[in-house]
Amino acid sequence: MKIDPIYIFRKTWATYQKVISHNLMFHREMLTAVKKLLESHPGPLNVLDLGCGDATHIGKMLNPGQVAEYCGCDLSPYALDVARKNLEPFGARVNLLCRDMVAVLREAPANHFDVVYSGYALHHLSLEEKQTFFTESRRTLRQNGQVILVDVMREEEQPRPAYLDSYNGAVAARWEALTTHERDQVQEHIRNCDFPETPTDLRMLAGKAGLTICRRLEKQTWHEAWCYSA
Ligand SMILES: C[S@@+](CC[C@H](N)C(=O)[O-])C[C@H]1O[C@@H](n2cnc3c(N)ncnc32)[C@H](O)[C@@H]1O
């Protein structure tokens, strides 16, 4: 049976909201680092957010006056309902799509966005789709535009099974804010659906797409924020 990579997000958004509110994936630190980068780009910016979820953090990374256009996409209608509320301060400049992020990216106009952002979603894609993410992002970016990626990443040289054991070990030991059932669900999701790359592998994919300048903005255990540009 094919496993639905976003089953947990489709079924219930509440578990992930708990993960965010207890900062179990370091959203706070990522927010601070990305906000600092974006402060040097007063805009107005065209922003594409791939796998936007409920947009809690992007809504805090950007000031409403900094945004000309925000397009977010996600496969979870529950998350998008919350995103609609979180993005109210951005008014009519918001466009939310319940669609696959690779399809949305492929159809994005060339030379249009200043920022392609993705938070904790890219690791759900195959290696080939991750390459498409960088290639198509490069195509849709304007001059001086950048990809900002927040995601889980394997340590260099760490194979996926070792990553899964370590991450799920941390969930068992430190995610006590979740119920046992919620922790089981999360661990199953990670085992079946998480395919994180190493920072070096991601840099190679970005480089192949012509995004040769890259910089790490933040790292907290396996949670990292990077920016890539041409
Ligand atoms: C861990 S959540 C991250 C949400 C938010 N970006 C954040 O940083 O908190 C991953 C999100 O990616 C979405 N997602 C996973 N694969 C996707 C795909 N192929 N297309 C669109 N959304 C996807 C899930 O529905 C989920 O909302």
Image (cartoon, helix red, strand yellow):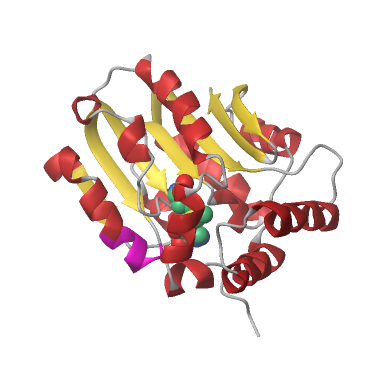
Which residue does the image show at 68% across and 32% down from the upper left?
203
Which residue does the image show at 66% across and 62% down from the upper left?
190
Residue 30, given in percent of the width and then of the height, sits at 51, 33
Q: Main secondary structure of the magenta part?
A: helix
Q: Which of 78 and 199 is in front in this view?
A: 78
Please state if 30 lies on the left or on the right of 207 as rendered.
left
Residue 226, given in percent of the width and then of the height, sits at 58, 29
Instruction: Decide: is 179 above or below 207.
Output: below
Direction left: furthest residue: 92
Q: In which quarter of the image is residue 112?
A: top left
Any part of residue 128 in sight:
yes
Q: In which quarter of the image is residue 69?
A: top left
Which residue does the image show at 56% across and 62% down from the upper left?
178
Instruction: Decide: is 6 above or below 58.
Output: below
Instruction: Decide: is 56 above or below 15.
Output: above
Q: In which quarter of the image is the N terminus?
A: bottom right
Please state if 14 lies on the left or on the right of 77 as rendered.
right
Any part of residue 112 in sight:
no
Q: What stretch is highlighted in magenta?
A: 75-81
Whether the magenta-drawn stretch holds residue 191 is answered as no
Which residue does the image show at 81% across and 57% down from the upper left?
165
Q: Which of 181 and 195 is in front in this view?
A: 181
Whether the magenta-drawn stretch holds residue 78 is answered as yes
Residue 56, given in percent of the width and then of the height, sits at 35, 45
